[in-house]
Image (spheres, grey):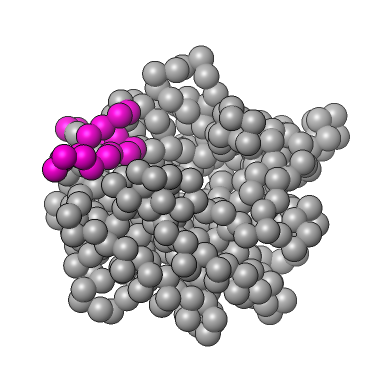
Amino acid sequence: MRIPEMKPDNNDVHRPDEQLLSRKELTSALELMIRRMETIDSHAMGGFPLYSPGPTDRWVVSPGGSWAGGFWGALWWLRSRLTESTADQRKASDICQRLSPKISVDSANRSLIFWYGASLGALWFHDAEARRLTGEAIAALAASYDPEINCIPLGTGMGGGKKGNKLVTTDTFASLMQLLGHSDRGDHAHISQCHANTILTACHTEDGVFHSVAYFEQGRFRLSDRAGMWSRGQAWAMLGLSRAAARWGEPYLTHARSACEYWKRSRPEPLPPNRLDNTLGLSDPSSTVIASLAMLSLADLVSDGTPWRVHAHQRLTAIVRSRYFTGFDENSDRKIILNRMAPGKFWGCCYKTNEGKDELVESAWGSFFLMAALCVLIGAIEPHHC
């Protein structure tokens, strides 16, 4: 499969570290991931692939996709962007249409589903069905805005439970900013900024550290988790802040920089623990991928973003060269055969499986974010598109 030549990376001349993935290596990693999608698709059998535990190919498949269904469509939109294949674009559009039942589900996770699964098709390909679903998702999410808590709550669907309408989380921060920002209506912009401000009020502490969830009770938000401990929760907050900063500038830009600085201080290694308060537990490379996307976005927003871009490039290089990504450098050929692991597999996502335990898995959302980050580095997409 051929990936067309992309625009040059103007930051190549600034690289202080010759061990960073070259443009050729970045393209090779993307080719592996594109080919990997064929295997995943064969396991999905018309459903939505959710996750596959560890180095296996035992995919858990959902007929409706749950909160992650949009990422399967996003992978195909991104693949279409790279291959310029009409067949890939038709595949992405078909997946997009199968997401439509989620419009009516009471959950802020709809922003994850429809920003990634639909809006990218509207943005990159002017796909009519994607544009329609994007509009319906924006209207549905805006209608769920609660003026009492000044945000769009998590909602009761997709696992939110009976308290979901009083919960606000960082998980959907970025996708809500993206999706509502796709509207040209002033009331949608107002709701979006209210949500961003509530995230800062409820979840932000000092020095860029974030709680991942807050519960509104008796007129104020209450916190149940230790700020900054969950790596992916902190990364979600960073990504959301970078999106808010791109739309409105300050004070979100200062908060985005502060949150990224905290990440660098608290997680100096590229494969951080899932939780800082359990260093003997599992790592979560996927959190680094999301954090790196936030830093790549920040790099585009500040006067000298090269250090942020280089830092993200370093982290993504470490992930692609780690055992959590198969088929690259020392993880190739004989090692794949010995471990029976297909090339192009990113299994570095810490996830609570149906067995009620955390496992490292391959997932549609993890693969999308890694592919998107690599695409940003070669100039195939803009940082604010993912």
Residue range in magenta is: 206-225
Res. 297 visible in picture: no
Residue under the image location 39 percent in, 56 percent down: 108
25 or 85: which is nearer to us? 85
Is 222 colored magenta in this rendering?
yes
Residue at the front extreme, as displayed? 162
Residue 56 in view (yes/no): yes
Tell me if 82 is positioned left or right of 122 in this view. Answer: right
For this rendering, which residue is in front, 248 or 18?
248
* Quadrant occupied by the C terminus: bottom left
Q: Quadrant of residue 207?
A: top left
Asked whether 348 falls inside the magenta stretch, the response is no
Relative vertical location of residue 348 with respect to residue 283 in this rendering, above or below:
below
Residue plotted at (83% across, 35% down): 340
Q: Nearer the viewer, residue 219 or 138?
A: 219
Q: Residue furthest bottom?
A: 128
Name the residue rendered at 22%, 34% in the picture. 222
Q: Quadrant of the N terminus?
A: bottom right
Where in the figure is residue 358, as x and y percent of width and height?
57, 29
Identify the residue at image location x=55%, y=68%.
101
Q: Give x and y (percent) for residue 120.
A: 49, 70
Q: Is 96 left, or right, of 381 in this rendering?
A: right
